[in-house]
């Protein structure tokens, strides 16, 4: 068999010979979609110039550098989110994305704000998981005034429309968790609530939605005052143990924010695993095991691949529009898991 020629490539890609030559030689302007079509045709017919075509496509792609500030690297959820971001960066068409992902052990607003400003010095846009605080808001305003887009992931850090946001509808999440308790508990009783930090808007909305459901549909349940875990496993374990001591008739526990690993540890160590209904967040190794052994009843989870894709595509659009594309908000559907569908 003879080696495919430029004419064969042009015919296979349905372009002119001149266009095929421009793609291979790198001279002249060719649309990304056309170059991609030529590449696919070259692969199909076994064209010898694949290296030149790949180099041409790579050279014409727009290049961006995006920075992300996530929580502690010891927490699997944020490691999973980082992995999803890296995978999504490889799938975004027509551009090359360089990611700078940093994990914060110190979640204080002062450190978060300082790291945001530092990361923005070398990045086109910044994504952050942060609590609402005036110091963080000031950093956001500074970056916006410099033309650096800021995207809030998981939890909003400003009223809708002021800062780009990718995440869930916390109100619906909380009401869905409440529905689960009402329909699974064999009788009304006391329900405990753990929150990481009420300054996280998502957690505040989770708890508000949770309470609103019971006020509307199941007022015979008693919802105890929420206890803060400060996103700490040790504190969550202690808070859960205290709840069990103070309320030996506790019917269920809703972990509306950080601390699920501590709550699981406390339920197991006190012999309450499977006796106290537990609803919490994010499908990961520790919650999968808890579903399987009956310590957890339901897991509500972010669709991490969608979060990552929406964040990166939103950043690309915003940077291309030089901030003139308006606020970008993507409220995603959440996932629900039991031991039967993991």
Image (cartoon, rainbow, N blue to C red):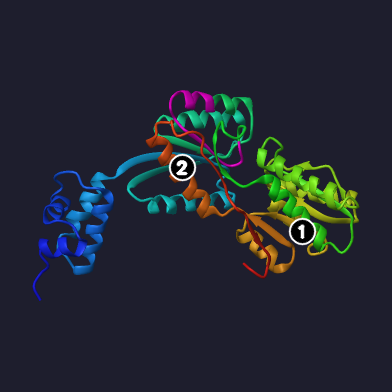
Front residue (pair 308, 274): 308
Front residue (pair 26, 261): 26
Specify whether residue 155 is painted magenta: yes
The percent coordinates of residue 326 (x first, y second) are 49, 33
Outermost residue toward the left in this view: 2
Q: Quadrant of residue 162?
A: top right
Above or below, 216 against 135 in this view is: below
Region in magenta: 140-156
Label 2 near label 1: C-beta < 8 Å?
no
Q: Classify mark 1: residues with Cα within 10 Å, few (<14), some (14-19) or many (20+).
A: some
**Residue 314 bears which disc, if any?**
2
Above or below, 229 against 37 in this view is: above
User: Residue visible at 69% across and 63% down?
Assistant: 290
Q: CA distance from mark 1 to mark 2?
A: 33 Å
Front residue (pair 81, 266): 81
User: Residue visible at 40% across and 41% down?
Assistant: 316
The percent coordinates of residue 196 (x first, y second) are 70, 42
Q: Is residue 63 left or right of residue 196?
A: left
Residue 166 visible, this orientation: yes
Specify whether residue 29 is painted magenta: no
Q: Is residue 272 left or right of residue 317?
A: right
**Residue 180 bears which disc, if any?**
1
Question: Which quadrant of the figure contains the C terminus?
Answer: bottom right
Q: Is residue 13 left or right of residue 62?
A: left
Q: Earlier in the sequence, mark 1 or mark 2?
A: 1
């Amino acid at each position: 068999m003879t080696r495919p020629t430029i004419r064969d490539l042009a015919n296979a890609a349905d372009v002119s010979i001149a266009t095929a030559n421009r793609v291979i030689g790198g001279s002249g302007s060719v649309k990304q979609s056309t170059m991609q079509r030529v590449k696919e045709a070259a692969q199909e017919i076994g064209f010898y110039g694949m290296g030149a075509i790949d180099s041409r496509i790579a050279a014409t792609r727009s290049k961006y550098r995006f920075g992300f500030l996530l929580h502690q690297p010891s927490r699997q959820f944020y490691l999973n989110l980082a992995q999803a971001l890296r995978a999504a960066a490889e799938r975004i068409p027509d551009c090359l994305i360089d990611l700078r992902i940093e994990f914060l052990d110190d979640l204080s607003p002062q450190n978060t704000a300082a790291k945001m400003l530092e990361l923005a010095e070398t990045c086109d846009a910044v994504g952050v998981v942060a609590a609402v605080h005036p110091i963080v808001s000031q950093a956001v305003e500074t970056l916006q005034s410099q033309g650096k887009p800021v995207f809030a992931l998981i939890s909003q850090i400003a009223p809708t429309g002021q800062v780009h946001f990718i995440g869930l509808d916390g109100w619906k999440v909380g009401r869905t968790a409440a529905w689960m308790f009402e329909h699974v508990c064999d009788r009304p009783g006391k329900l405990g609530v753990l929150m990481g930090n009420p300054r996280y808007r998502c957690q505040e909305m989770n708890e508000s939605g949770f309470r609103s459901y019971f006020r509307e549909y199941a007022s015979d349940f008693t919802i105890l005052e929420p206890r803060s875990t400060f996103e700490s496993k040790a504190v969550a374990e202690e808070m859960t143990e205290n709840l069990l001591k103070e309320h030996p008739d506790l019917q269920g526990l809703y972990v509306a924010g950080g601390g699920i690993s501590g709550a699981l540890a406390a339920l197991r160590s006190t012999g309450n695993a499977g006796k106290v209904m537990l609803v919490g967040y994010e499908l990961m190794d520790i919650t999968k095991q808890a579903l399987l052994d009956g310590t957890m009843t339901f897991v509500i989870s972010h669709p991490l691949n969608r979060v990552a894709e929406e964040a990166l595509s939103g950043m690309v659009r915003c940077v291309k529009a030089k901030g003139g594309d308006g606020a970008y908000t993507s409220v995603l559907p959440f996932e629900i898991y039991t031991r039967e569908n993991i």
